Image (cartoon, rainbow, N blue to C red):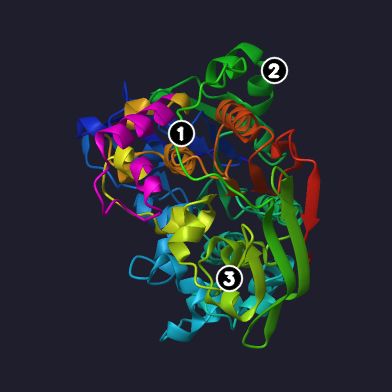
Amino acid sequence: MKVSNCLIASNLVQRFDEVRFNGPINWQIKSGEQWAIIGPNGAGKTLFIDTLAGKYALKSGKITCFNASGEEVKPSECIKIVAFRDIYSLSDTRESFYQQRWNVGVMQDGTPTRELLPKTAGSEWGKHLIARFGLEDLLEKDIRLLSSGELRKFLVVKSLLNSPQILILDNPYIGLDVVSRKVLNELFEEIIAEGGVQIVLVLSNPADIPAAITHVLPIVNRSIKQAMSKKDFLDDKALREELFAEIEPEKLNFPTTSKEDLHSSEIIRLNNIHIRYGKRTILHELNWKIEKGEKWALLGPNGSGKSTLLSLISGDNPQAYANDIHLFGKKRGSGESIWEIKKRIGYISPEMHLHYLKNIPCLDIVGSGFFDTIGLYLSCSEEQKQKALEWMQLFGISHLKDVSFLQASSGEQRLTLLTRVFVKNPDLLILDEPLHGLDARNKEKVKNIIEKFCGTEKSLIFVTHYDEDIPKIVDKRFVLSKR
């Protein structure tokens, strides 16, 4: 087969300094090649693909694309990018509130998932994709009720149904359970065998590079390294160490925040929990008890009810009042306010990240953790600002203190929201996929902080689809199955 160019990026220089790389961008994709763009958090990977997609004006350079017949076409006609932020395009997420997923009774004019798929969903290929990802039961469900993992699977299927020439997937494995990751890799093989679509994966960890990838483009500090074959990249230990330098566990001195002592030894007690939405039962006769100082992993496939369960504990789900739930020694509905519950809980989730669209400095995002708000509506005291900055230094993101949250990379946003969890010194940490999108170095840093912070007194619920991400201090498991 004759190898021809499908995409050529020649001497691209972005017009504005805040999105400009350290040198001109030069890159090309040839037919038959499948690429991974890889680098640490904040390296510029998303800036790179957004530049290819025409999101940023160019000071100089040109992006040229060719179709299968060798004819030049517009980049927008051949390139399709799918990223976590694209969930916003699926529904009125920007206009909805964070707890809306749990407040079905106040939701109006919901959009069934099926209506957001292209017409090709009815083709044999469409039916195959929907069946492979197990989305059949979700098609009539309101799009706003899908879990973050289900939304990601839906986005991947939707993008494949549009049959782009070059499909760029930004961190496609985030939020997918083990079975779904395996299915996605098998689909990559099928797509490549058909020859109609070339894939480009944007990744933060070398371990995520699938067998289908043939070439790698490393990026670090907004600089493009030499493109190479996947084999050469995996054999180049020095380059991988440059991209993802290992860190020694640090001696951590945590900023202290005073609060009332916790008198109850019982943190959570759930008795015969039953949650149902429409015809679908999410949780049935569920019982769970967590004592002070216990560390749990909450596990289960996409759609098994993990996020629903956590919403009951965190105070975001109104069905908590229809169930027998005790938090910190008090029964829900016995007169306590939601803020009394939240002040003892540090919580992060994919849903929170999805709704945290605040164009304010990252320092203010961290400071909002003192008030348990989505955004900063009360002013931090000087002491609170100092505590927030100390925590940012601990997480290695103090350089972002004056940077708008929306201008930070997705990995930097996740670190900012993680820092927000710790500032008020909570008794219970609920960390729902907290290592989402973090590179190997930052994962180890965050796990080290979690392990040292929790010690013997703090309680922990840790949610993940990767066993290797579970901190060593976790010694108990609670596993949900999809009903």
Give the spatial CA distance, label 2 vs label 3: 56 Å
Q: Is residue 347 above or below residue 473?
A: below
Q: Position of residue 192 (x, y in %)?
A: 66, 50
- At a point 32% along the width and 29% down the height, the residue shown is 386
Question: How many discs appear?
Answer: 3
**Mark 3: which secondary structure?**
loop
Q: Position of residue 91 (x, y in %)?
A: 42, 72
Q: Which residue is mark 2?
A: 235
Look at the magenta stretch and give its main secondary structure: helix
Q: Is residue 437 left or right of residue 131?
A: left
Q: On the image, which quarter does residue 393 sit in?
A: top left
| Quarter of the image with the C terminus in it | bottom right
> Along the polypeptide, which appears first: circle 2 or circle 3?
2
For label 3, the crowd category at 10 Å Cα-Cα, with few meaning under 14, some 14 to 19 and many 20 or more, is many
Magenta segment, which residues? 366-393
Numbered disc in front, either 1 or 3: 3
Label ID, residue 332: 3
Q: Is residue 322 left or right of residue 79?
A: right
Q: Amino acid at mark 3?
A: Arg
Q: Is residue 416 above or below residue 134?
A: above
Q: Amino acid at mark 1?
A: Gln
- At a point 27% along the width and 42% down the height, the residue shown is 380
Q: Amino acid at mark 2?
A: Asp
- At a point 61% along the width and 52% down the height, the residue shown is 175
